[in-house]
Amino acid sequence: MKSRDAALLLLVAALVGASMILPGRIAPVENGEVLASPADSENPDAKSGSHKARPRVIVVGSGISGLTTALELGRGGADVTVVDMSSVFGGHAVMSQGGVSVVDTPLQREVGIADSADMANGDFLKWGEDADPDWVRYYVDHSRTEIYEWLLDLGVRFESVLTAPGNSVDRFHQPAGRGIALVTPIYEACLAQESIRFVWNAQATKLLEKDGRVAGIEVRHLREGTQEKLNADAVVLATGGFQSNLDMVREFWPQDITFPERILAGSGRNSIGLGHRLAQSVGGELVKMDHQWNYFTGIPDPRRPDSQWGLSAANMFGILVNPDGKRFASLHNWAKEVMPPMLRQKRVTVWFIFDEATRKEFVISGTEWTDFKKVERLVLDNPDLVKKADTIEELAKKCGLPAENLKATLTRYNELVDGGRDLDFDRFGPKKTEYNNRASPKLNSPPYYAMQAWPLTRKSMGGVAIDLGCRVLDKKEKPIPGLFAVGELTGLAGINGNAALEGTFLGPCIVTGRVAARTILGTQPEKVKPLPRETSRCVDCHDVEALLETRRPGFWHFEQSHQIVLERKLNCILCHSELAPYDENRHRIDAKKLTSSCVGCHVAQE
């Protein structure tokens, strides 16, 4: 290995914050009460009850639910080890829009919105159809304090409250800076806690049991290929969903719907069901696994055309047609109007039809796609993904759609736009609703475009069974001692039922994380003031291009982020300002300062 390669690897090690697991007392946790460890049994203070040992807890996963759990535990006095397969924090949440559904907040009142927990409870149960009533009630009663006020204390700022289908009033709170700005302050607060340690590039492969309870995990260090056992008093699984594991998607697909001939994976890179299998290995039960939240907007990822991976792409200013070339739903109430009929078609696919005037409205979800020139180069100008023609007849021929039907559909749609009301699907009209009165221009500016889309997996709304304290339950609905689960792994605690209100994915991740921590601690942590945010020619020593030539296990994020650096010809100091000027004695990456650079890539759009 070149000396400069070795130096760069040292920098990477500092970046990921790989820390040693320090020896310490192990204190059992029972019914939320922290007890003295065996080592304390001969301690007079322990016997008198004046001393309680610090519990050691392992959190598997550093997504938003795992970070929330870790922070709550650390602030409450626990020693916490966070284990993650990646080398960076945040999971899929950093790539999201970042909105959370919160009830009756000062921001709502400022803009004249009157909300209440009872109103929200009705909305959640009606929209979700089989949502868990106890968790829904807890969520709507506590979302303001558990989510909104907690995030404000951490430094998150909300810039607006948006409309979302299924809500009687607007309650989708949009944070400034989107998903990355929602998650980063939680991570920064974790870094400020000396009792919280991170072990990166490590996969939990087994739950360890002792004396009838879960007592730790076995991990495989992905970069070194070594195994290690980590002991703890409690383990919290925060591993996310399973929607990027197409075998599991098929295994738990709803029985009343035929599995699509083609379906693309569009969830988090590590949302492959590892936590589900870990919980099952010690008797944990899975519930409502057929509650899968998928999109109709999937296209093959042009960067990996021969893989299972897809992108969520759409033009909401166009129209949607089925394989017969006919409209069959309104784009804007897609959750309940598009997906069900699409999945019941003989050919489970749709086409977005738009024109040159609306071409600029084409979007791809994700932080890597904010550059429209990149969208044009890789997707819009890619004939394998988007067809283009000067006439509707020619476009239909390229797509294999009935030309007469497609032409009639466009003619009818333009007539409805002229009339000011969508008489077919109520997409637009004089009466504004949560679905209609969106901008609906006529589609009559050639050339015309068509993008074929397939189902795209996204989120899990079923998962590991838990009680109201986030204890993992077995088939008899009894808690498995020492084992907890939070976030999407639990199907968001059943808060969504089989249909999700927007903002009820990240919100339940935060709530379940805080609940699990308090169950383990048995205490309410005191509030901590947020830390101040810090913002922000290494190539002479570090040959990044050479390091990217070969894919290496455990370096996925390093390779992705530095590929972007090369593409954009960025200066290293934009992310690593603490390394300049060079000082051999302090030439180390500061993990906290590095978080401020994440927004350079992760400013997502949906």
Image (cartoon, rainbow, N blue to C red):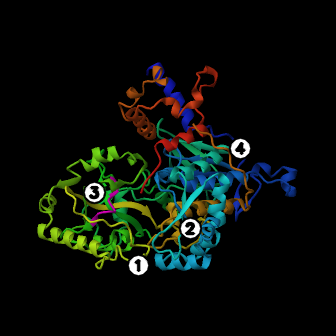
Residue 463 shown left or right of residue 521 in the figure: left
Three-letter code, disc 3: Ala
Q: Which residues are magenta?
A: 310-319
Label number found at residue 24: 4
Where, by quadrant of the figure, is residue 454 drawn?
bottom left
Three-letter code, disc 4: Gly
The residue at which mark 1 appears reads as 431
- Mark 2 → mark 4, Cα distance in angstroms: 29 Å
Dot placed on the residue nearer the N-terminal end, 1 or 2: 1
Quick one: SS at disc 2? loop
Disc 1 crowd rating (10 Å Cα; few below 14, some 14-19, many 20+) is few
- Mark 1 → mark 2, Cα distance in angstroms: 43 Å
Q: Residue at x 33, y 67 (%)?
A: 440
Label number found at residue 466: 2
Quick one: SS at disc 3? loop
- Mark 2 → mark 3, Cα distance in angstroms: 50 Å
| Front label number (2 vs 4) | 2
Front residue of 285 and 247: 247
Residue 349 coordinates in the image, percent (x, y):
25, 65
The residue at which mark 3 appears reads as 357
